[in-house]
Amino acid sequence: MSQRRVRVVAKALAGLLAGEVGRFTAAESGPSREHMRARAVREMFESLGPFYIKVGQILSTRPDFVSPATIEELCALHDSVPVAPFRTFEPVLEAELGRRWHREFRDIDVNRPLGSASLAQVYAVILSDGRSAALKMQRPGISSVVRADMAVLRRAGQLLSLLKPGFAEVVDIDGMLDVIFDAMVGELDFTIEAANMELGTRMAEGFELLTVPGVVLATPRVLVQEMAPGCSIRHVRRVGLSTAQRQAIAQDLLAYMYHGYFVGRVFHADPHPGNIFVHRDGRATLIDWGMIGRMDRSMSLKLALVLANIAQNDGDGAAGAWVELGKATAWADIEGFAADMVSLVPKVATASLEELNFGIALTTVLGHSTKRGIKTHPLVPLLGKSFANMEGSIRHLAPELSAAEVLRTELIDILMDLACEMLSDGYAARGALELMLTADQGFNQARGVLRDLANRETRFTADSPTRAQFSGRLPEYALAALAGAAALSWRNRGRKDA
């Protein structure tokens, strides 16, 4: 590992993340100088390579430590490189598919790639059976380059934590890097991306207007998938869909993301306009599943409670749920954060996508929480990126749509899914195990008290296992209660209908 590269990256991150880049007074330089510096940051990320482009894109969702001018530049980061000749990829095809790889394809349009990025290049092909498909090939040697960059950034992050201990107290640098690394696994191994696509397909089964391309063939460096019909969502006007069709697709896309966050707990982390195709038949296809995010049940429930409070215009409730989502430092200003949320939430709850980006609002909350000394879960920036990208895509379809209104509409279905999960055998078994553990702890405490009484040494401890189990998990139990109520309501309604 190059120590010089580590120092360069650490220094750049220290300036960027600590807010020292682009934050100048008007007397010193003025807005033009600030934007020049921000542009230099963006160009630095692009020059460092594909991995740093992804890092820069995620940093664009962190207004808590990146200046507005720098955020604007980082949002413009694009993973596009000059097209490489097809012969560059022939050794990859031979290594992955064998010397007779030609037999898999009837034709390959080698002169006009469908896409060219720093990690891979994509071509339109006709398979041996006559079907149209997309052939995605990893650039030779790129995987080792990215993994080396990951090691460099990990070391740079450690140095940054030492240089900026106050910053590290509210920003989990290691955790944030873990999220980025985990999300990118599928981009370095196409068999993982293929598995992600199959998972995305299962998640789309309940949405009649959404599809995910089928996987034809997958190896670590070669992926062949069905061709996505139509055109990018940014060119939807060419398709000629009616207003009702566009709104229906937009509604399904947002609902799909919500169910991914709160029920499946797996979500497409990069649903920008280039990764969503719309066809004239009124259906949409989500492509490029190399980068996904995952969260555990507890976090998804807490996040659901945050967004539900925002959708219901409850600033205090949203503030409390957000604090549960993260961790308050010793110097946290909880009251100040609650005041921030009371001011922000009414602007979000009723706004359309044309008026306000719900995903950007989420990152604005992140900015307030960091400023007030609340350490946020490291997955939140990736969620913010995913949400903001999806909203940006949907804005091409139906800017009049309100993300908060769609959440209010979908919340009952989400609660029903959670209620069904709670009534499943697996959930019941886990609940039984927790109950047994609590009972065992209570028995041991009771036995200890009896022993102390027998020895005339009565000692009581303040800790209560039951209270400890509920501490910090109120959002989960609150949503569990709501889910149970929804299930009972549904069952009673079914009886009345019968």
Image: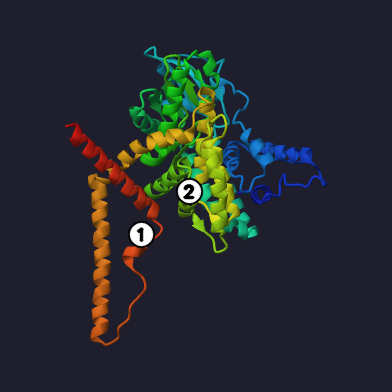
Q: Amino acid at mark 2?
A: Ala
In the rendered image, residue 484, in percent from the top left (x then y), is placed at 28, 46
Q: Does residue 35 appear left or right of residue 440 in this picture?
A: right
In the rendered image, residue 403, in percent from the top left (x then y), is placed at 48, 34
Residue 446 figure quarter: bottom left
Q: Bin the neighbour count of mark 2 within 10 Å (Cα to Cα): few under 14, some 14-19, many 20 and up.
A: many
Q: Does residue 66 appear left or right of residue 91 in this picture?
A: right
In the rendered image, residue 191, in percent from the top left (x then y), is placed at 41, 33
Check residue 156 in the rendering and tell me which mark sits there, or answer none: none
- Cα separation, mark 1 vs mark 2, equals 19 Å
The single residue placed furthest to the bottom in the displayed view is 456
Which residue shows up at 60% across the image and 40% down it?
60
Up the image or down, 255 lies above or below 366; here it is above
User: Mark 1 touching mark 2, by CB under 8 A?
Assistant: no
Q: Is residue 204 visible?
A: yes
In the rendered image, residue 438, in percent from the top left (x then y), is placed at 27, 63
Q: Which residue is mark 1?
A: 470
